[in-house]
């Protein structure tokens, strides 16, 4: 249930080969792809769960498979992954103090936040969000 504040000396990405994206997790590599996915979520009426993470962060590696699992179970939500090192300026604009940090967004606005690799709390927040969204009628 920890979080990382800065990259430690001796952390070697090649030693720890963890899959951070997969399932229904969309890897965000540019500000434009972020904007596109938020627009898509708004259009589809989906709430976004954004994971601001780092490949060198131990707790991020621990929670990554669980995040992927959640994305596969809850297709009514949109799951995004942002590498804070790849998009450092963008991540700074979200005031990321530690990784992982999860933001929950509806219509582009923050409706929740969780800092740290706390799987039970992440599950609780996702469940709470799903329970708060009325089911949309099936389209013909």
Image (tube, rainbow, N blue to C red):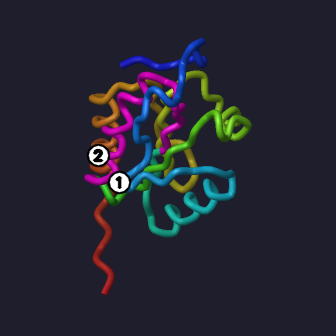
Q: What element carries label 2?
A: helix
Magenta span of residues: 50-73
What secondary structure is the magenta-colored segment mainly? helix
Which percent across, then down, holds residue 18? 40, 36
Quarter of the image with the C terminus is bottom left
Q: Is residue 59 magenta?
A: yes
96, above or below 137, in the image = above
Choose between 2 and 126: the one closer to the eye. Answer: 2
Q: What element carries label 1?
A: loop
Q: Is residue 126 above or below residue 32?
A: above
Residue 3: x and y, percent?
47, 19
**Residue furthest top as drawn:** 9
Please state, as top left, top right, bottom left or bottom right, where the N terminus lies in the image. top left
Q: According to the image, label 2 marks what residue? A: 69
Q: Quadrant of residue 139?
A: bottom left
Outermost residue, bottom side? 140
């Amino acid at each position: 249930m920890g979080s990382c504040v800065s990259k430690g000396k001796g952390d070697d990405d090649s030693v720890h080969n963890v899959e951070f994206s997969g399932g229904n997790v969309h890897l965000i590599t540019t500000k434009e792809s972020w904007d596109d996915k938020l627009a898509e979520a708004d259009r589809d009426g989906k709430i976004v769960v954004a994971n601001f993470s780092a490949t060198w962060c131990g707790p991020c590696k621990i929670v990554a498979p669980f995040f992927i699992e959640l994305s596969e179970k809850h297709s009514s939500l949109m799951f995004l992954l942002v590498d804070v090192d790849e998009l450092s300026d963008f991540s700074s604009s979200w005031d990321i103090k530690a990784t992982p940090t999860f933001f929950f967004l509806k219509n582009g606005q923050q409706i929740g936040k969780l800092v740290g690799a706390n799987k039970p709390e992440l599950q609780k927040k996702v469940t709470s969000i799903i329970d708060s969204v009325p089911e949309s009628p099936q389209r013909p």
